[in-house]
Image (cartoon, helix red, strand yellow):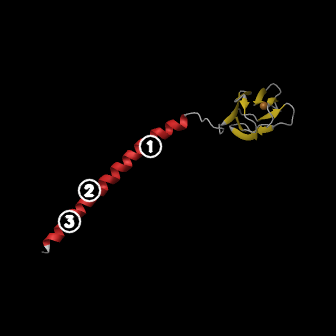
C-alpha cells in the first residue's frame, strides 16, 4: 500500500524534470537562433516611410550627404575633419549649424518651403553645398 504512491511520485518527478529541462533548453535555443537573422535582415532593408536618417558628413573640407530632403526634415551634420565647420545657408536665414571638429555632430531642421538652398562654411569660403527641399 505505502510503496505504490511513493514509486509513482518518483516517476512523476523524474518525468517532470526531464520535460522541464528538455523544454527549457531546446525552446530558448531555437527561439534565439531563429529570431536573430530575420530581424537583422529587416533592419538592413531601406525603410519606405518618412523616418530616414539624413546625415551630411564633412570630410576633407567638403560636404557629403543628401542632396534632396523632405520639408522640415531633421538633418544631422557630422564633422570628420579636425577643424570646426558650419553649414550656413547662403541667405543667412534658412539654417545655420556650427559643428565641432573631431567627429562632432549637430542637428538642424531643413526649411519647410520647397526650393534649392545653397550653403557654405562660415569659416572656409571655398566650402559649398546645396540642399534641395522637395
Ligand atoms: Cu569649414
| Quadrant location, the C terminus | top right
Q: Mark 1: give few (<14), some (14-19) or many (20+) Cα within 10 Å.
A: few
**Residue drawn 14% across and 70% down?**
4
Instruction: Quickly name the residue at label 2.
Output: 18
Q: Distance between the residues labelled 1 and 2?
A: 26 Å
Q: Is residue 121 above or below residue 12?
A: above
Labelled pair 1, 2 in contact (Cβ < 8 Å): no
Instruction: Quickly name the residue at label 1.
Output: 35
Q: Residue 53 carries which label?
A: none
Which quadrant holds residue 117? top right
**Residue drawn 30% across and 55% down?**
21
Labelled pair 1, 3 in contact (Cβ < 8 Å): no
Which numbered disc flags the more N-terminal residue, 1 or 3?
Answer: 3
**Residue drawn 40% across and 43% down?**
33
Q: How far apart are marks 1 and 3 (CA)?
A: 37 Å
Residue 17 lies, in percent from the top left, at 27, 59
Amino acid at each position: 500500500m505505502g510503496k505504490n504512491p511513493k514509486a509513482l511520485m518518483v516517476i512523476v518527478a523524474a518525468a517532470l524534470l526531464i520535460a522541464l529541462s528538455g523544454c527549457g533548453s531546446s525552446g530558448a535555443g531555437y527561439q534565439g537562433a531563429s529570431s536573430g537573422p530575420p530581424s537583422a535582415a529587416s533592419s538592413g532593408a531601406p525603410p519606405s516611410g518618412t523616418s530616414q536618417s539624413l546625415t551630411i558628413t564633412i570630410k576633407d573640407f567638403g560636404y557629403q550627404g543628401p542632396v534632396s530632403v523632405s520639408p522640415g526634415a531633421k538633418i544631422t551634420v557630422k564633422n570628420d575633419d579636425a577643424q570646426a565647420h558650419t553649414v550656413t545657408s547662403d541667405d543667412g536665414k534658412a539654417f545655420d549649424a556650427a559643428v565641432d571638429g573631431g567627429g562632432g555632430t549637430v542637428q538642424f531642421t531643413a526649411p519647410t518651403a520647397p526650393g534649392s538652398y545653397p550653403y557654405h562654411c562660415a569659416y572656409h569660403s571655398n566650402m559649398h553645398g546645396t540642399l534641395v527641399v522637395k
